[in-house]
């Protein structure tokens, strides 16, 4: 019997159903298949594989994840999207304009999952009233400590600044994840950041045999800078937070943290309880009040899941 080839510590760069692709260090793509005993790797997972046939490799191990990004499925349960993500680029644009709630939901998810957030305001070449409004909204997040980068995939404004932010080192490789509504310019930004993107995407779609349909799944690409990768996530997300305890949700609003535990009731849900420390802060600050309102809206959304 011939020895079966094995390769360890590869990255799963795309995953769908029972199949996926592993990326080798020299940027080859190997078709992989899963076994129930091991489970499905996510895009971004570190995996070991064993050759089955000329064309097919079997996943034999999924390494422990240092992080993952998730959203709610339609039952309010956590659905995992991508693994080993270090920072999320929350892309927003004047068109299609985001809701404040959408931005807050993304930021909360990243806080809970231990992923850092960068707000990327794209399409700043579109000088109109909406841009001014967005800049205004984003100043709140800057005050909270979130980094905001303004850019334009159309004329390359801000792309170098963005590129710097995505750089990893050999000691600490960096994987970034593009998230945001469909149409905000995620794929356009990817094109600016990766000069040979069309090569990478065409070898991906050849390998998956799925052509353009691969844009419906998360995919990891190599950035030109060493030790730096980026995952493009599928568009058209009505992004929802999975159901979680109220105290966990409240703690994901970073400016709430220092006030938690100071309400009259130790199990205060910060709705209309007397002597609520968050409400007291909201009475003094419009910005705090608007985030508290958002917290309450998310909590109410979660109640709907709980009642089903
Ligand atoms: N004016 C302008 N248009 C942009 C910019 N970035 C993307 N677009 C356009 O916005 C549309 C959606 O872009 P796309 O990259 O497909 O968005 P995605 O759905 O987030 O991947 C396309 O028509 C792009 O040409 C930008 O910085 N400025
Ligand atoms: Mg896209
Ligand atoms: Zn309270």
Image (cartoon, rainbow, N blue to C red):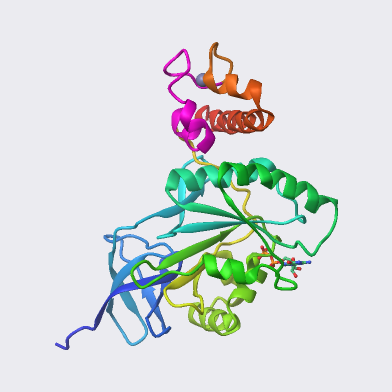
* Horizontal side of residue 38 vs 231, given as left or right: left
| 33 lies above or below 75 | below
Q: Which residue is most to the left?
A: 1
User: What segment carries the magenta color?
Assistant: 246-270
Seen in the image, is 93 located left or right of residue 256? right
Which residue lies at the image location 57% right of the left edge and 83% below the top edge?
202
Whereabouts is ligand 1, in terms of quadrant? bottom right
Residue under the image location 62 percent in, 44 percent down: 141
- Please provide percent x and percent y for residue 162: 59, 66
State the image quarter where residue 195 is shown. bottom right
Q: Residue at x 64, y 45 (%)?
A: 102
Q: Nearer the viewer, residue 178 or 212?
A: 178
Residue 230, image x, y percentages:
51, 68
Picture quarter with the N terminus? bottom left
In the image, residue 253 lies in the stretch drawn in magenta: yes
Left or right of 184, for residue 170: left
Q: Nearer the viewer, residue 181 or 223?
A: 223
Please tell me which residue lies in front, 3 or 247.
Answer: 247
Q: Is residue 44 magenta?
A: no
Residue 16, visible in the rendered structure: no
């Amino acid at each position: 019997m011939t020895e079966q080839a094995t390769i360890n510590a590869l990255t799963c760069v795309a995953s769908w159903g029972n199949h996926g692709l592993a990326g080798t260090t020299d940027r080859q793509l190997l078709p992989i298949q899963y076994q129930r005993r091991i489970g499905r790797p996510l895009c971004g997972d570190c995996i070991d594989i064993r050759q089955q046939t000329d064309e097919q490799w079997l996943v034999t191990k999924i390494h422990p994840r240092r992080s993952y990004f998730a959203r709610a499925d339609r039952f309010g349960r956590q659905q995992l999207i991508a693994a080993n993500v270090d920072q999320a680029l929350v892309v927003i644009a004047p068109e299609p304009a985001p809701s404040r709630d959408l931005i807050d939901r993304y930021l909360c998810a990243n806080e809970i999952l231990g992923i850092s957030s960068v707000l990327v305001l794209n399409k700043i070449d579109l000088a109109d009233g909406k841009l001014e409004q967005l800049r205004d909204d984003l100043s709140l997040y800057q005050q909270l400590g979130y980094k905001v980068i303004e850019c334009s995939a159309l004329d390359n404004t801000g792309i170098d600044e963005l590129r710097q932010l995505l750089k990893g080192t050999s000691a600490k490789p960096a994987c970034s994840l593009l998230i945001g509504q469909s149409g905000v310019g995620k794929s356009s930004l990817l094109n600016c950041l990766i000069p040979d993107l069309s090569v990478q995407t065409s070898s991906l779609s050849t390998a998956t045999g799925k052509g353009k349909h691969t844009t419906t799944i998360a995919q990891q690409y190599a950035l030109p800078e060493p030790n730096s990768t980026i995952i493009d996530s599928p568009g058209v997300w009505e992004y929802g937070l999975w159901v979680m305890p109220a105290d966990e949700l409240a703690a994901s609003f970073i400016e709430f943290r220092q006030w938690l535990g100071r309400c009259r009731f130790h199990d205060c849900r910060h709705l209309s309880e007397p002597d609520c420390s968050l409400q007291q802060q909201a009475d003094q600050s419009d910005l705090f009040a608007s985030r508290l309102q958002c917290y309450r809206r998310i909590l109410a959304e979660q109640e709907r899941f709980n009642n089903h």
